[in-house]
Image (tube, rainbow, N blue to C red):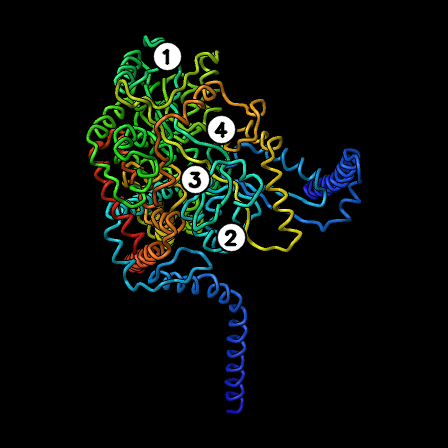
């Protein structure tokens, strides 16, 4: 009896110590999150109800919901919202699909004597390391109608040149391709990590049971990669909604507003038109959009993970 | 083996760092010696002892004459050894940060934009109207850069729109002279196109140049109706300018747009120079500030400077004078932030020093701009031959202000998007003009709020 009581006491004090230590370890992160995420977010929320030009000597003027009401009348707002969704969905789906296929290809143990697997993996990861503006400038040059490399190749093949940066619909595709190219590297790494955690015994027993390679991929690999797929879907879609510099550098939102993103409009209103209120209202709208979509995604994907 | 290699690399790195620091020490000694030798009277040390050491920051947005600026500042530091000048690189949205932080550089270049106005309101820009250089600038120019009684600075030069021609292509198309009116221009475009060349390009990516084609066309129709540059500007700024009221201008925009090179809307000013250097396009409309690059490009591709042609935009009717658009270039502004007597004095010294003709010629020669100060002698001003021929024409030519003097950021963005759609063949001039008309009024209403 005495022993049990002492044990309980010890356990309680151990738990208390753990909580205290854990809290202390979390404190620096919490301070950073509050200082650099929570407070700025609240501040943006406040600005979205005010009129302000960003000058420290000018006071904010409260205008209520005026900035939000104005959004509907902003020229190109509808096109911008449509493209933001199309861009995010297309980039997310394509990135996850391409990276999954590439990860499966890069997971093959040997490519023969002269091809190094690590080198190939590094090649796919390089785009993720380059700054968005640099990538954008390179793609913009490649898409140049008159002397871009893509049109030169089409020309050599006897095909008609494509006006990548001035044609409605085509420019959107051009921007999406570039964004996918950049994001694929990171997703491949996550998939590769997931693939390596799958026990080889599962494949061995499936082979003994007579399962084909395709069946093994569909019945073992894909289900066990579900957590990686969830992570990739969530991170890629957030990155796609937040994308700014790469699409902007390639197309500047042209032609018309067909490749304009919410982020570009936030930048325009806040830092070009010095209308921080409208910029902040758009930012809040984007935060709500991302949060809602992530919630839906997580619910669906987690349910899928549970099935597996 | 790996450890040995890492150790070797570390030793090499440390050695290199040590070498660098020694070299820079020597460099300092050398420059001090050099300064001491250069001065006839008091030595550098004596000069330094008399004055408090000051560091001045010079910021140039889109710096396009970095060597000239470095030379000018080095000369200044040699003459004023207690003042150190640091030239800062161009940064994206730098002035927005300045507005938020109040951290204003001592000297900067800035147009009278909404940012500049906010900076004047925040007391970040000094009134330069009392400086020596302002006595050598016409009152019109000073007025154009004055806001709320504060003259924000002296414009670096005069900007005007120019049509540049590759005369070799024009000659191939049967044109020995540049077109002198809208009918000739359209015919010339047609002839050039028939020879397999693209007729016209511009920097659609840069709002000033994107707007330039339309404003030059509009000027020929609306300019005369308003009577004066200031009346046109006022109407623009008031939101009462009737873009849609000049169907002839709209029609001409449509006709000219048909000859614009594909891909133009994505072009930067550098891309335009590259396109001219490729020899595939015959004409481009651009600001005189691009003359160096464009004339050089045409000369390179044709192999002869004689093939470089330039004229004021030829969009007027036959028998009428050419209209152009003009603007003071961005001004050199001085910080209005009080940083102590020694610092303020040094700042003023640098400002006056830059504008002394013998010093300013470094910047003028490097950029090929038309200066606004009247105390520079003709031998101090170097201009491209094609531009030099136009400089005398500009003051007498009828003109309106370039768009960036009048528009709001919101209007600029919407108008240039609409125009780029026309240039790319995705929309009609009428649709673009209607969009501009609505936006101008809306933009004005927003400002009123």
Q: Are marks 2 and 1 on the same chain?
A: yes
The label nearer to you, 4 versus 1, is: 4
Q: Looking at the picture, how far across and down is residue B384, in whole percent? A: 49, 21
**Residue of label 2:** B124
Circle 1 Cα neighbour tier, 10 Å, few/some/many (<14 / 14–19 / ≥20): many
Q: Looking at the picture, how far across and down is residue A170, in whole percent? A: 28, 34
Residue found 65% across the figure and 47% down from its top = B346
Tell me how far mark 3 sits from mark 4, CA to CA: 61 Å
Q: Report the chain holding disc 3.
A: A
Badge number at residue B169: 1
The label nearer to you, 3 versus 2, is: 2
- Mark 3–mark 2 contact, CB under 8 Å? no
Residue A132, quarter of the rendered image: top left
Badge number at residue A106: 3
Q: Report the chain holding disc 4.
A: B
Residue found 38% across the figure and 53% down from its top = A231
Tell me how far mark 2 sits from mark 4, CA to CA: 28 Å
Task: Give A248 or B11, whichever is nearer the viewer.
Answer: A248
B256 with respect to B73 (left or right): left
The label nearer to you, 2 versus 4, is: 4
Tell me how far mark 3 sits from mark 1, CA to CA: 53 Å
| Whether residue A304 is visible | no
- Mark 3–mark 4 contact, CB under 8 Å? no
The label nearer to you, 2 versus 1, is: 2
What element does badge 4 sit on? loop
Tell me how far mark 2 sits from mark 1, CA to CA: 50 Å
| Whether residue B290 is visible | yes
**Residue of label 4:** B370
């Amino acid at each position: 009896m005495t022993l049990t009581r002492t044990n309980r006491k010890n356990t309680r004090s151990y738990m208390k110590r753990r909580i205290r230590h854990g809290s202390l370890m979390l404190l620096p992160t919490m301070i950073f999150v509050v200082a650099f995420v929570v407070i700025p977010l609240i501040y943006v929320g406040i600005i979205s109800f005010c009129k302000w030009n960003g000058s420290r000597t000018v006071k904010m003027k409260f205008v209520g919901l005026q900035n939000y009401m104005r959004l509907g009348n902003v020229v190109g707002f509808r096109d911008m919202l449509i493209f933001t969704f199309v861009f995010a969905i297309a980039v997310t789906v394509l990135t996850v699909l391409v990276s999954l296929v590439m990860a499966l290809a890069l997971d093959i143990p040997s490519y023969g004597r002269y091809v190094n697997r690590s080198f190939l993996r590094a090649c796919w990861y390089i785009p993720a390391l380059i700054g968005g503006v640099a990538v954008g400038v390179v793609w913009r040059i490649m898409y140049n109608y008159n002397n871009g490399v893509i049109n030169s190749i089409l020309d050599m093949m006897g095909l008609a040149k494509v006006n990548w940066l001035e044609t409605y619909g085509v420019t959107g595709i051009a921007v999406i391709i570039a964004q996918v190219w950049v994001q694929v590297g990171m997703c491949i790494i996550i998939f590769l990590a997931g693939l390596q955690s799958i026990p080889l015994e599962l494949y061995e027993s499936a082979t003994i049971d007579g399962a084909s390679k395709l069946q093994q991929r569909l019945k073992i690999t894909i289900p066990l990669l579900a957590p990686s797929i969830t992570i990739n879907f969530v991170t890629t879609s957030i990155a796609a909604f937040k994308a700014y510099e790469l699409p902007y550098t390639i197309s500047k939102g042209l032609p018309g507003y067909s490749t304009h993103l919410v982020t570009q409009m936030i930048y325009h209103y806040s830092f070009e038109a010095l209308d921080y209120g409208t910029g902040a209202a758009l930012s809040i709208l984007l935060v709500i959009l991302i949060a809602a979509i992530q919630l839906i995604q997580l619910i669906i994907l987690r349910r899928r993970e549970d099935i597996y | 083996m790996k450890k040995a290699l890492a150790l070797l690399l570390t030793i090499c790195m440390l050695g290199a760092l040590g070498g660098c620091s020694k070299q820079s020490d020597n460099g300092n000694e050398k420059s001090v010696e050099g300064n001491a030798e250069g001065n006839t009277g008091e030595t550098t040390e004596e000069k330094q002892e008399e004055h408090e050491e000051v560091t001045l920051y010079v910021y140039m947005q889109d710096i396009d004459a970095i060597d000239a600026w470095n030379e000018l500042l080095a000369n200044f530091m040699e003459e004023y050894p207690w003042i150190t000048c640091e030239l800062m690189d161009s940064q994206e949205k730098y002035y927005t940060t300045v507005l938020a932080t109040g951290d204003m550089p001592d000297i900067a270049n800035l147009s009278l934009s909404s940012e500049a106005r906010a900076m004047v309101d925040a007391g970040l820009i000094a009134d330069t109207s009392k400086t020596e250089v302002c006595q050598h600038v016409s009152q019109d120019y000073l007025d154009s850069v004055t806001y709320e009684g504060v003259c924000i600075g002296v414009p670096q030069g005069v900007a005007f729109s120019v049509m540049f021609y590759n005369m070799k292509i024009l000659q191939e198309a049967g044109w020995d002279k540049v077109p002198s009116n809208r009918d000739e221009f359209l015919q010339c475009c047609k002839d050039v196109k028939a020879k397999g060349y693209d007729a016209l390009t511009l920097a659609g990516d840069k709002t000033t140049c994107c707007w330039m084609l339309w404003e030059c066309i509009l000027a020929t129709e609306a300019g005369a109706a308003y009577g004066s540059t200031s009346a046109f500007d006022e109407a623009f700024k008031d939101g009462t300018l009737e873009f849609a009221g000049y169907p002839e201008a709209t029609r001409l925009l449509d006709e000219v747009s048909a000859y614009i090179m594909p891909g133009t809307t994505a072009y930067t000013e550098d891309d335009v120079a590259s396109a001219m250097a490729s020899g595939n396009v015959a004409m481009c409309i651009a600001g005189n500030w691009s003359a160096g690059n464009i004339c050089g490009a045409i000369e390179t591709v044709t192999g002869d400077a004689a093939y470089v042609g330039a004229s004021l935009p030829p969009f007027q009717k036959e028998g009428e004078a050419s209209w152009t658009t003009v603007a003071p270039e961005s001004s050199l502004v001085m910080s209005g932030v009080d940083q102590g007597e020694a610092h303020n004095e040094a700042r003023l010294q640098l400002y006056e020093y830059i504008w002394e003709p013998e010093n300013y010629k470094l910047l003028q020669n490097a950029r090929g701009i038309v200066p606004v100060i009247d105390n520079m002698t003709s031998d101090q001003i170097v201009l491209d031959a094609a531009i030099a021929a136009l400089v005398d024409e500009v003051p007498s030519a009828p003109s309106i202000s370039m768009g960036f003097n009048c528009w709001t950021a919101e209007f600029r963005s919407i108008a240039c998007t609409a125009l780029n759609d026309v240039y790319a063949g995705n929309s009609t001039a009428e649709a673009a003009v209607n969009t501009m008309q609505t936006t101008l009024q809306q933009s004005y209403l927003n400002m009123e709020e």
